[in-house]
Image: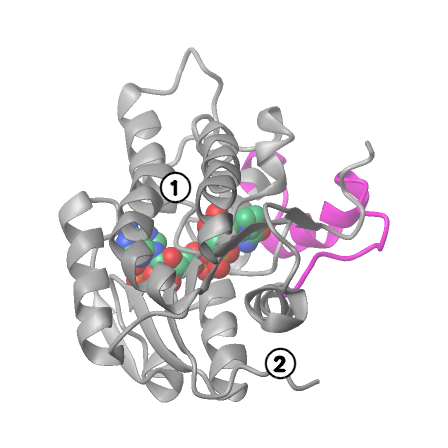
Amino acid sequence: MDLGLHGKTALVTGASRGIGLAVAEALADAGVRVAGVARTITPELEKVATATVSADLSTAAGATAAVRSALTELGGIDILINNAGGGDGDKLGLEGVLDIPDEQWRNLFDLNLFGVVAVTRAALPSLIERRGAIVTVSSINAQLPAGGPVGYSEAKSALTAFNKRLSEEFGPRGVRVNTVSPGVVGTAIWRGPDSVGAKLAHANGLAQEQFLDAVPEQFGIASGRITEAGEVAALIAFLASGLAGNIVGADIVIDGGTIKTL
Ligand SMILES: NC(=O)c1ccc[n+]([C@@H]2O[C@H](COP(=O)([O-])OP(=O)(O)OC[C@H]3O[C@@H](n4cnc5c(N)ncnc54)[C@H](OP(=O)(O)O)[C@@H]3O)[C@@H](O)[C@H]2O)c1
């Protein structure tokens, strides 16, 4: 399908691996010049990106500097994909509210909410000028708070709300804003060592692979399988394109049927 994106520019955060890398690849395939941001620049990202920016997006200074570099490299931003998120597994506890220190709350809000606010604020003047599009990666945990690490779900709920606000404020100025909320996606968050997946497997007394095999049944995933990064990327590329020209302020779930409510 021709997305009609040839010659456009995009800033993709968290583009070094997982969903962000898959988005960078999908957009580059569609003829988009991509600036990819992460703390570590991988060879896979180097291969598809027009420009790479190494930055820590959990700080306002890092987020602002990253957008500045991308603007210099690309000459302007038509598409912003706010994908960086989650949290470093070694700093993520899966215990309850009484056991989790303030530091975890702050780390998770800094990356999953305030980093996105800072990136978006810095990119908006260019997006307004070019009548661009923003797609932000939230999570089904925004709707299922108890299913995610303490602080993560809450940050994602606030992130979805922030993007809804943006869609109302900037839609009339030509910038389309939407969120995508995935369920379990087969990335480093689940498959990596020291990840949420590894910790949950350990807590359940299972090898990580065994645990991941059991996830669809345990989580009630109607399709019987988890989502792959490329599937999320295809949805994001569509939402960023003119084919989705009147989709504004939507939160699109891609979870194989994990969420049971209307
Ligand atoms: N996988 C899932 O099941 C799932 C489900 C729902 C929502 N999501 C959301 O989808 C998004 C992508 O997740 P993923 O599964 O692709 O995770 P991932 O494989 O861990 O990739 C995360 C990306 O974000 C970057 N990143 C992390 N912290 C950063 C920081 N402080 N500054 C700059 N970049 C940073 C990482 O690169 P560096 O580490 O090199 O910085 C990497 O490129 C996240 O927002 C996550 O919350 C994922």
Give left or right: position of 177 versus 36: right
Q: Residue at x 40, y 70 (%)?
A: 78
| Whether the residue under disc 2 has CB within 8 Å of ligand 1 | no
Residue 164 in the image: x percent, y percent?
A: 53, 39
- Quadrant housing the N terminus: bottom right
**Residue type marked 2:** Leu
**Residue type marked 1:** Asn
| Whether the residue under disc 1 has CB within 8 Å of ligand 1 | yes
Residue 23 in the image: x percent, y percent?
A: 50, 71
Task: Indicate the quadrant where residue 107 lies.
Answer: top left
Q: Which range of residues does the magenta coloring cover?
A: 202-228
Q: Residue at x 48, y 36 (%)?
A: 165
Give left or right: position of 131 versus 114: right
Give left or right: position of 85 versus 37: right
- Tell me the residue that label 2 is attached to: 3
Instruction: Rate crowding at label 2 as few (under 14), some (14 to 19) or many (20 or more) other CA atoms within 10 Å.
Output: some
User: For the view shown, which residue lies furthest in the top direction?
Assistant: 98
Which of discs 2 and 1 lies nearer the camera? The answer is 2
Q: Residue at x 33, y 71 (%)?
A: 36
Residue 257 in the image: x percent, y percent?
A: 80, 47
Give left or right: position of 66 versus 204: left
Q: Secondary structure at mark 2?
A: loop
In which of the image's four quarters is ligand 1 placed? bottom left
- Tell me the residue that label 1 is attached to: 112
Q: Give the vertical position of 222 relative to 47 (above or below).
A: above
Q: Give the vertical position of 63 relative to 130 (above or below).
A: above
Residue 205 visible, this angle: no
Residue 216 in the image: x percent, y percent?
A: 77, 49
- Quadrant housing the C terminus: top right
